[in-house]
Amino acid sequence: MSNVEYGLVMQELERGDSGLRSFCSVQGALVMYPIHEFGTEEQKQRWLPEMAAGRRLGCFGLTEPGFGSNPSGMTTRAVRDGDHWVINGEKTWITSGTIADVAVVWARTDDGIRGFLVEKGTPGFTSSDIHGKLSMRASVTSSLAFADCRVPASAMLPGAKGLRSALACLTQARYGIAWGVIGAAMDCFETARQYTIDRKQFDDRPIASHQLVQEKLANMITEITKAQALTIHAGRLKDQGKLEAAHVSMIKRNNVAIALDVARDARDLLGGNGIIDDYPIFRHMCNLETVKTYEGTDHIHTLVIGERVTGIPAYR
Ligand SMILES: Cc1cc2nc3c(=O)[nH]c(=O)nc-3n(C[C@H](O)[C@H](O)[C@H](O)COP(=O)(O)OP(=O)(O)OC[C@H]3O[C@@H](n4cnc5c(N)ncnc54)[C@H](O)[C@@H]3O)c2cc1C
């Protein structure tokens, strides 16, 4: 195993598939985390062992048709009615929405934004899939609708109070995404490195023997290595309990950006072969376009970092 092949910092980093990463981060960070962190003992016992074993699936319902980057404007509402909550509203772009056994749903109440566990089959809760995606095609993406959907009072996650709790789940998922996209970049780099050694043009010489090609490869491995170094540092801060949301914004934003650049350069180095599915590059490129948007867009993470260093929020 050469250093070049496996990156210069993290030799054991898995090859990331952003479609799979999307699914895992939703199930782990966005569904199991809120139940683990904010749920009752009964909710934990009911869902977590089954989810950990892969027998039950969940989804995370925050985004709404009119509120993506700004979830604080959400209009989904939950109103207390005796021993129940009645939920009305709509969520969209929800990963695994139609196949999930339970949805973590964020809704506005008289007591601020709260989280609820809404089980599949609950009257008033319906879901449908979004079709025509050219990215993240291996994962199901759905819309959820709630029309006078009654859930028992025990469906509320008691520890989830305010948008801050929903954002805490996103911070967990974004940390995982920051690693996953490096894996995608490594796969693109390694594919391009090998291809340029094997592919011959002009006097039967490998295209990797040209300085312009080597410059691209040198830039790619340098950016990957910088992302690895930044992210392992963030991981160490996480271990010490010192990782801030702005740190996570930095690694998510940086790593997605470099992974997209690496994927595009790798696509270029494979010439025509870069666009076919015999190679993983175009799939990574298309998936990374989604990763740039979900879990906080590149712009929003820029603004989070900007606020952290100036103290001035610039979202509005
Ligand atoms: C495949 C996929 C899976 C997803 N899975 C989930 C899921 O499981 N659960 C969930 O809740 N959501 C999920 N999402 C939704 C995702 O989080 C949102 O798409 C994302 O937050 C962006 O929201 P939006 O699409 O409404 O874009 P918008 O918010 O409309 O943004 C459009 C553009 O405007 C820019 N913009 C907006 N506001 C500002 C501003 N203040 N300053 C500068 N630029 C700004 C954005 O950066 C972006 O470039 C998923 C999305 C996709 C594509």
Image (cartoon, rainbow, N blue to C red):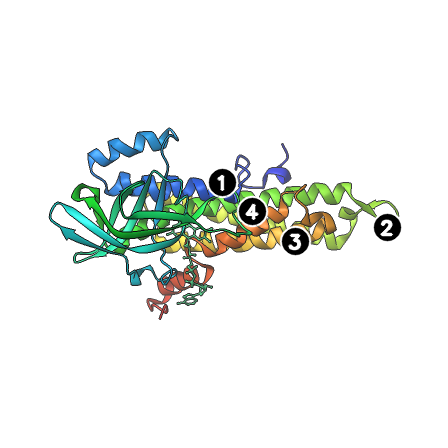
Judge depth for marks 3 and 1 and give the one in front.
1
**Image x and y of residue 92, in percent:** 39, 54
The tag earlier along the polypeptide, 3 or 1, is 1
The tag earlier along the polypeptide, 4 or 2, is 2
Cβ atoms at labels 3 and 1 below 8 Å apart: no
- Amino acid type assigned to the residue bearing label 4 in the image: Thr
The residue under label 4 is: 225
User: Quick check: can you spot residue 160?
Assistant: yes
141 and 48: which is toward the camera? 141
Q: Is residue 258 left or right of residue 93?
A: right
The residue under label 2 is: 202
Alpha-carbon neighbours of circle 2 within 10 Å: few (<14), some, or many (≥20)?
few
Q: Is residue 71 left or right of residue 11?
A: left
User: Which dot marks residue 265?
Assistant: 3
Cβ atoms at labels 4 and 2 below 8 Å apart: no
Identified at 74% across, 55% down, the residue is 212
**Image x and y of residue 162, in percent:** 23, 55
Identified at 86% across, 45% down, the residue is 204
Q: CA distance from mark 3 to mark 1?
A: 23 Å
Cβ atoms at labels 3 and 4 below 8 Å apart: no
- Amino acid type assigned to the residue bearing label 1 in the image: Leu
- Amino acid type assigned to the residue bearing label 2 in the image: Phe
* Farthest-out residue, left: 82
Q: Is residue 2 above or below residue 196?
A: above
Cβ atoms at labels 2 and 1 below 8 Å apart: no
